[in-house]
Image (cartoon, helix red, strand yellow):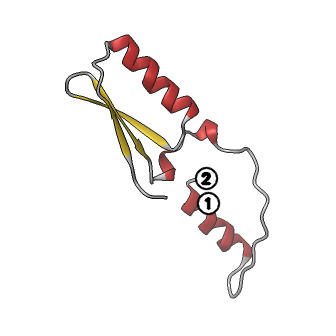
Amino acid sequence: MPAWEVVVEKDLDKEERKKVHDFVREELHLIESLTLEGSKIKLKYNRNLRKMDPKARQKYIHFTLYKHGIDTFNAIFRLSRATYIS
């Protein structure tokens, strides 16, 4: 997905900015919100999925692991390191 960003040009007070940031954090997990000077907010696509809110992750995932030349424990260990799940 291509990178993009949007700047909310309206100056918002602290309470309004907090509502926007909370909504983005809770509902739009691939979007990042930043406060700019002048009380404006920048929204941008978050390429780094590791920043995703842990509550937004599914509890379980089903997949088939095909491995060749590696034992099961080592394969699972590598998966857990790559996904930051222990």
Q: Say which amino acid is labelled 2.
A: Ile
Provide residue 19's location: percent of width, then percent of height.
Answer: 46, 18
In the rendered image of this protein, does residue 36 appear above or below residue 14? below
Query: Residue farthest to the bottom?
Result: 69
Asked which quadrant contains residue 77, the reply is bottom right
Kindly indicate whether the residue at mark 1 contacts the one at mark 2 (C-beta within 8 angstroms): yes
Report how far apart the C-alphas of labels 2 and 1 lie in the structure.
5 Å
Q: At 58% from the left edge and 57% from the top edge, which residue is drawn?
A: 83
Q: Which residue bears the numbered disc 1?
A: 80
Q: At 44% from the left edge and 48% from the top edge, which residue is drawn?
A: 46
Q: At 43% from the left edge and 26% from the top edge, which residue is drawn?
A: 21
Q: Say which amino acid is labelled 1.
A: Ser
Q: Residues within 10 Å of mark 2 (few under 14, many from 20)?
A: few
In the rendered image of this protein, does residue 27 appear above or below residue 77? above
Q: Which residue bears the numbered disc 2?
A: 85
Provide residue 84's location: percent of width, then percent of height.
Answer: 55, 54
Query: Residue farthest to the front?
Result: 9
Provide residue 58's location: percent of width, then percent of height.
Answer: 70, 45
What secondary structure is found at the residue carrying circle 2?
A: loop
Q: Judge left or right: residue 77 versus residue 36.
A: right
Asked which quadrant contains residue 16, the reply is top left
